[in-house]
Image (spheres, helix red, strand yellow):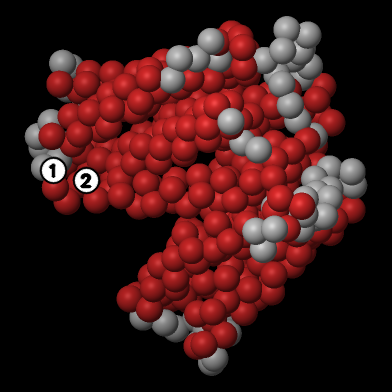
Amino acid sequence: MQANSSRSLVTYLVCFVGFTEAIIYGFSFPYYSLLLEQRGLSSTLIGMNAMLGSLGVLAVGPLVPGLIVRLGYAKFSIVAMLTAGVSFAAIAVVNDTWALFVYRTVLGTALAGLWISTEAWLNHVVDNRYRGLMNGIFQMGYSFGFFLGPCLIYVTDISTLWGPAAAASIALVTMAALSAFRDKGSSDFEEEDSVNWQVAWQARGLLLIAALVGIAETALYTLLPVFGIGIGLTHQVAVAILVTYTFGEVILTMPLGWLADRLDRRKLLAGCALVASVSVFAVSAVNPIPVAGWTGAFIAGGTVVGLYNLALVVVGETYKGKNLPLVSTAFSMAYSLGCAAGAAVGGAAMDLFGPQGLIVSIGLILIVFCIGAYFGLSGLGRQAAPTKAIAETL
């Protein structure tokens, strides 16, 4: 009973860490962009600064599994959160414009490590019977935290240090919560476990899925407003399509996780990809048939992002011990590579085929995803029929 209580406590702690990490991450994007714009930097340099923050996962990724194994999940998260907090506190010491590029790189690296470690840690501690639900709660909290981050801009002045102070304070509170959990480092892993990077290649089906989700999610998130304007909608309505898409992302993630605990996860992943594809195609009808377009945008938001969560659930169910942070790292890196390519893929399709090129290209990618998930993950994520304990809760 005590062990189950301790596991539940750690599970909710990880969700809290993911939530606060997302607040800091969400704050960093508008903060740095507005601060650099205020100092007269070009859009190109502002974009390069943002790129440094986003590429952190690729820079730190290969080191993360070994560090997690050496330190344990909690200590690694403390170090990463401390690094993030210091990167904001340093602004009060050296506020040179070019130093902001160094701070952004350090912050991006720290948050990338936190992103990988929290997802792997959650999969490490959660009971497999509730893995989908808890991952859904985690992702919903992360999305909400990412939404709250930019809200800090409204209550702080860019020209003052209140914004960085707030972000550093959030990091400090998170570190205090993590410190209350007495992690024993290597006790997270069995002594006989060994890290084998070939496992990442064996998980290539999951890595391909992560990359495809990254492409689809980033292309839609970046270009849906451009698509709307291209088919004759006003700027306000075009942005509203994206808001509807984002709303679906927040609302539907947890129900999909709940389903993942009750259905064959591989088949659910394939079915979710099929629904996502149909929903994306439905968005193209938003001008002649508004109800179809708005409904499609809402469902697409939940299912496209839900694909990431469902694939992560399969990762946690399939890989254990020291292989879990390794595959989680490779999964995050593949997703990031997909995100880097997503806007370019969608933009090229729109240049070649007009606004509908975005819908067709992403819809076809999701169909490929559906086929790959069903046939390419044979033997992975085959959740048996609900256990008696879960069946009794239905």
* Residue occupied by mark 2: 152
**Disc sitting over residue 10 in the figure:** none
| Mark 1 neighbour density, 10 Å: few (under 14) some (14–19) many (20 or more) | some
Q: Give me the residue at 78% from left, 35% from top.
A: 318
Spot occupied by residue 284 in the image (x, y as percentages of width and height): 58, 79
* Image-quadrant location for residue 90: top left
Vertical side of 386 occupied by 319: above or below: above
Vertical side of 331 occupied by 76: above or below: above
Vertical side of 326 occupied by 150: above or below: below
Query: Which residue is at the front of the view, 66 or 281?
Result: 66
| Mark 2 neighbour density, 10 Å: few (under 14) some (14–19) many (20 or more) | many
Tell whether 381 sits left or right of 78.
Answer: right
Tell whether 172 sits left or right of 258.
Answer: left
* Residue occupied by mark 1: 156
* Amino acid bearing label 1: Thr
For the residues bearing labels 2 and 1, Cβ distance under 8 angstroms: yes
Spot occupied by residue 340 in the image (x, y as percentages of width and height): 56, 43
* Amino acid bearing label 2: Leu
Query: In the rendered image, which quarter contains the N terminus?
Result: top right
Secondary element under disc 2, as helix, strand or loop, is helix
Query: Which residue is at the front of the view, 392 or 302?
Result: 392
